Amino acid sequence: MKLLHIDSSITGENSVSRLLTRQIVDAWVAQHPDTQVEYLDLLTDAPAHFTADAMAPRTGQTDGLTEAQVRENAVSERLVSQFLASDVVVIGAPFYNFTIPTQLKAWFDRLAQPGRTFRYTATGPEGLAKGKTVIIASTRGGIYSTSEMGQAAEHQESYLKVILGFFGITDVRFVRAEGMGLGPEAKATALEGAAQQVRVAVTTDKAANQESLAQAA
């Protein structure tokens, strides 16, 4: 089993999402000792933002491409191959300005490749990255999950559900710690709740995992 561990927070050792992804990976490996872990830190190894050069054919073709297109093609190929080779993906996704970090968005832009992670059919798009489990460490300074106003302003978890679903991934699990900026007591409560969610998230059975998360919501 291959697990891809991704962090995207810009706050280094002060990052709660990095703390949670480490806990998730450690808990997963404890249950699955044969897991091979590969790490990608998008703070230090993020692809450039999506450009016309990055939209060039990404199937290894080099004929007729400019030097910039060949270079961007190689970056995209490396990232999508790494993603497709994984069975489990753990993603640290902090909440910045109502959405995910730009580094993480740039990574998803490189993964969205026709013929690799999705394809268009006569009945609509079909995801080609089926069968993976994705566990997301979602961290937020405020509270957005408990009110209609908060949910309307949230373009973090909602975006992740859509893009991963577009890739054909239906087993998406969240470990959420929100209210981190509301004082020490609120932070401690959020971290305690997140620790319990980690134990649920590493459950191998998808149906049992979703039922447990629904009961905890």
Image (cartoon, rainbow, N blue to C red):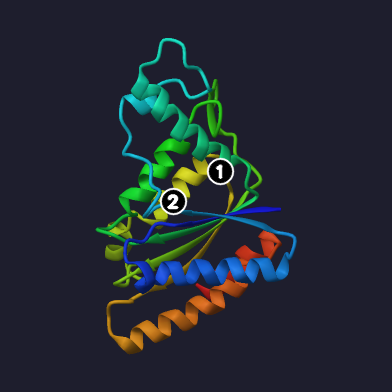
Amino acid type, residue under disc 2 in the picture: Leu
Q: Label 1: how many residues lie within 10 Å, few (<14), some (14-19) or many (20+)?
A: some
Which secondary structure, mark 2?
helix
Disc nearest the viewer among 1 and 2:
1
Which secondary structure, mark 1?
helix
In this rendering, would 152 be left or right of 71? left
**Farthest left residue in view:** 97
Compared to residue 107, the image places residue 197 above or below, namely below
Please tell me the numbered disc located at residue 83. 1
Q: Which residue is mark 2?
A: 160
Determine if residue 127 is in view. Answer: yes
Q: Label 2: how many residues lie within 10 Å, few (<14), some (14-19) or many (20+)?
A: some
Compared to residue 75, the image places residue 45 above or below, namely below
Amino acid type, residue under disc 1 in the picture: Phe
In this rendering, would 125 be left or right of 47? right
| Whether label 1 touches label 2, CB < 8 Å | no
Does label 1 or label 2 sit earlier along the sequence? 1
Q: Position of residue 94 (x, y in %)?
A: 37, 62
Q: Residue at x 38, y 25 (%)?
A: 55
In this rendering, would 109 be left or right of 202? left
Determine if residue 168 is in view. Answer: no
Q: Position of residue 65 (x, y in %)?
A: 40, 15
Q: Position of residue 137 (x, y in %)?
A: 47, 64
